[in-house]
Image (tube, rainbow, N blue to C red):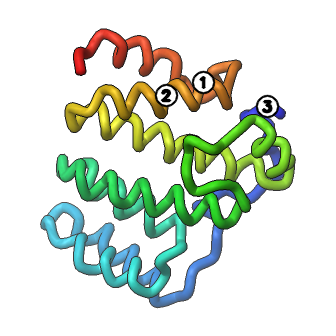
Amino acid sequence: MDLMDFEGEKLYFEESLPPEVEALLQQAGDLYGDGAAEQPLAEALRLAPESLNVLVAMYRLYYYQHRLEDALTIARLALSVTAKRLEVPEDWNLLTVAHIGQAGPASMALFRFHLLSLKALAYLHLRLGRPAEGRAILTKLLELDSHNRLGARQLLEVAETVAD
């Protein structure tokens, strides 16, 4: 299976949301410049805890505010949500190439999202001074993505120059 083969699939941002959650996301966008976006996003997360739209918005808020531990928490939530949807192990250590095939073409976009969330987790560990954790995740990503479609190899090359 090619991780780039997801033509015709719905992407996470095309998922429909309840109107009140949509309104909260809009409000958060409007308030972002004022530094007041977290409260509406937190409420959106409370109302739609498994919405990838909400999780991505929350992740971006924390990441761009350099709140990397909070971003790490959200990345883990996204991995949990997508693992359940894909019916694959929540523990990334247990993922195999067979799980990609199991997800099948109908879920390739979601599986790609799952793996990109895993890459985000690796990157955050690197930024937080935990290179061993980051390298372990990136090594797993390369095992799952031998064609390096997600760009884990380049990040791993950089990570290998960082001492534990």
**Separation (CA) of disc 2 from disc 3:** 18 Å
Badge 1 crowding class, 10 Å Cα cut-off, few under 14, some 14 to 19, many 20 or more, is some
Q: Nearer the viewer, residue 156 or 150?
A: 156
Residue at numbered disc 1: 142
Q: Tag 1, which secondary structure?
A: helix
Q: Quadrant of the N terminus?
A: top right
Precedes in sequence: disc 3 or disc 1 = 3
Name which residue type carries label 3.
Answer: Asp
Q: Nearer the viewer, mark 3 or mark 1?
A: 1
Q: Residue 106: horizontal and vertical position, in percent?
A: 84, 54
Q: Residue at x 76, y 47 (%)?
A: 108
Identify residue for label 2. Answer: 138
Q: Amino acid at mark 1?
A: Leu
Label 3: which secondary element: loop
| Residue 86, picture quadrant | bottom right
Q: Residue furthest left?
A: 34
Q: Classify mark 2: helix, strand or loop.
A: helix
User: Any mark on residue 4, and which?
Assistant: none
Question: Where residue 65 sits in the image (x, y, percent)?
Answer: 18, 52
Q: Nearer the viewer, mark 2 or mark 3?
A: 2
- 86 shown above or below 161: below
